[in-house]
C-alpha cells in the first residue's frame, strides 16, 4: 500500500463527535513517549501530520486522519503518563475506553511498545482487555534501531511469548521511525484487512 493522501478530519473526546464519513478505522495507541506520533508521521510520509514532542502526553484527544479517502488512521491519547494529574489520567482513560468499546468502525488496534523495555503491567492489562473484547490487534515494537540485532531478537522472542500467552498467534512488528523500519509491514497488515473486508462484502451481495 502507498499512502498518497493523509488529511486531518478532526479531534474528538467521544465517539459521537467522530467524522461523519464512515470508513474502517485503524487506531494507534501506546504508553506516553513510546514514539507514536513519530511512527504515524513515518507511515504517512509527513513530518508534522501528528504533533511530536519531547514531553510525554502530548496527544490528549482522539485524532482522525483520512487516508487515501478510504480509511482512517486514528491517533489515540497515550496511557500511563505518571506526571499527569489523577483527574487528567481518569479523563484520558475514559476517552480511550469510550473509543475502543464503542467505535463500530474500529477494524484493528496497533499497540505500540518500546522494544527496549519489558512488558509493563499497564500494557499487560490493556492488551488483556482488548483480547478479551475480541478486538483485532497488532503489536509494534518501536525504537528497534536502538537495539543490537541480538538484543532485538531477544525482545521479539520475549514479547511473542509473553503476549502470546494472552493472545495466541499475535503479530509483533519491529519498527523504527528514524530508520523507516516496519512501514511496509504495518501497511501490509492494513491492506490485507481492507481487501479481506471488501471480499466479504462482495460475497455477502451474491
Image (spheres, grey):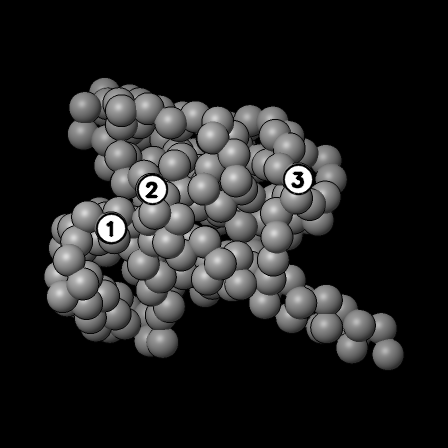
Q: Nearer the viewer, residue 60 or 66?
A: 66
Q: Nearer the viewer, residue 89 or 145?
A: 145
- Estimate the x, y position of residue 61 in percent, counting from the top left: 46, 27
- Estimate the x, y position of residue 170 in percent, counting from the top left: 36, 70
- Pointer 3: what residue? 5
**In the image, which is nearer the foreground, mark 3 or mark 2?**
2
- In three-dimensional space, the C-alpha distance between marks 3 and 2, rounded to whole angstroms, equals 21 Å
Name the N-terminal-most of marks 1 and 2.
1
- Estimate the x, y position of residue 97 in percent, counting from the top left: 42, 42
Residue 41 lies left or right of residue 80; in this view the side is right
- Pointer 2: what residue? 178
Classify the position of the N terminus by image quarter: bottom right
- In three-dimensional space, the C-alpha distance between marks 1 and 3, rounded to whole angstroms, equals 27 Å
Tag 1 near tag 2, CB within 8 Å: yes
- Estimate the x, y position of residue 198 in percent, counting from the top left: 72, 67
In the structure shown, which secondary structural element does the residue marked by tag 3 occupy? loop
Name the N-terminal-most of marks 3 and 2.
3
- Numbered circle sitting on residue 79: none
Amino acid at each position: 500500500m502507498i499512502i498518497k493522501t493523509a488529511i486531518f478530519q478532526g479531534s474528538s473526546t467521544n465517539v459521537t463527535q467522530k467524522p461523519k464519513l464512515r470508513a474502517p478505522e485503524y487506531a494507534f495507541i501506546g504508553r506516553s513517549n513510546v514514539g507514536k506520533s513519530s511512527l504515524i508521521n513515518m507511515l504517512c510520509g509527513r513530518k508534522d501530520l501528528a504533533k511530536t514532542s519531547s514531553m510525554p502526553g502530548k496527544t490528549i484527544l482522539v485524532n482522525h486522519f483520512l487516508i487515501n479517502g478510504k480509511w482512517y488512521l486514528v491517533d489515540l491519547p497515550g496511557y500511563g503518563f505518571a506526571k499527569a494529574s489523577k483527574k487528567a489520567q481518569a479523563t484520558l482513560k475514559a476517552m480511550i475506553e469510550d473509543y475502543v468499546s464503542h467505535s463500530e468502525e474500529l477494524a484493528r488496534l496497533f499497540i505500540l511498545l518500546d522494544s527496549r523495555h519489558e512488558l509493563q503491567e499497564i500494557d499487560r492489562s490493556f492488551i488483556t482487555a482488548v483480547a478479551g473484547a475480541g478486538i483485532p490487534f497488532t503489536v509494534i515494537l518501536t525504537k528497534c534501531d536502538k537495539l543490537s540485532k541480538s538484543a532485538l531478537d531477544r525482545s521479539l522472542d520475549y514479547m511473542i511469548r509473553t503476549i502470546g500467552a494472552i493472545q495466541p498467534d499475535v503479530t509483533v512488528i519491529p519498527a523504527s521511525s528514524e530508520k523507516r523500519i516496519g512501514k511496509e509491514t504495518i501497511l501490509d497488515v492494513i491492506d490485507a484487512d481492507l481487501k479481506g473486508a471488501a471480499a466479504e462484502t462482495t460475497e455477502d451481495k451474491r
